[in-house]
Image (spheres, rainbow, N blue to C red):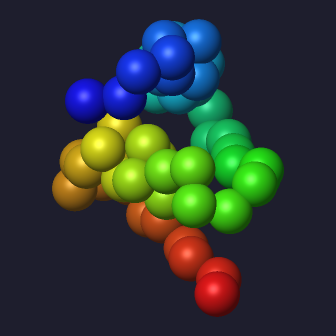
Amino acid sequence: MFFGREEQMEQLESLWGKRVSSLVTCWGRRRVGKSTLVAMKLTHPNIVTLRAF
């Protein structure tokens, strides 16, 4: 569970409901849980995620 991430979770949820393809980027300071936030929200077999390190 994330504290203080309600706005970001709502934004990801609204993108999930769209009927068209979307490119979503997530950026910010390191070590704040960006990848974990996206991974938690996007665990669905019809979603393709790309990660660059």
Above or below, 10 against 53 in this view is: above
Residue 9 position in % (x across, y down): 48, 21
Q: Is residue 16 left or right of residue 26?
A: left
Which is nearer the eye, 4 or 24?
4
Which is nearer the eye, 8 or 2?
2
Q: At 43% across and 43% down in the image, what residue appears?
A: 37
Q: Is residue 13 left or right of residue 14?
A: left
Q: In the rendered image, which quarter contains the N terminus?
A: top left
Q: At 77% across and 50% down in the image, what residue appears?
A: 28
Q: At 49% across and 51% down in the image, what residue appears?
A: 33
Residue 47 position in % (x across, y down): 38, 54
Residue 36 position in % (x across, y down): 40, 53
Determine which quarter of the picture holds residue 41.
top left
Above or below, 45 against 2 in this view is: below
Residue 8 position in % (x across, y down): 58, 23
Residue 53 seen: yes
Q: At 64% across and 87% down in the image, what residue appears?
A: 53
Which is nearer the eye, 34 or 10?
34
Residue 19 seen: no
Q: Is residue 53 left or right of residue 41?
A: right
Above or below, 47 against 53 in this view is: above
Number of dots carrying numbers: 0
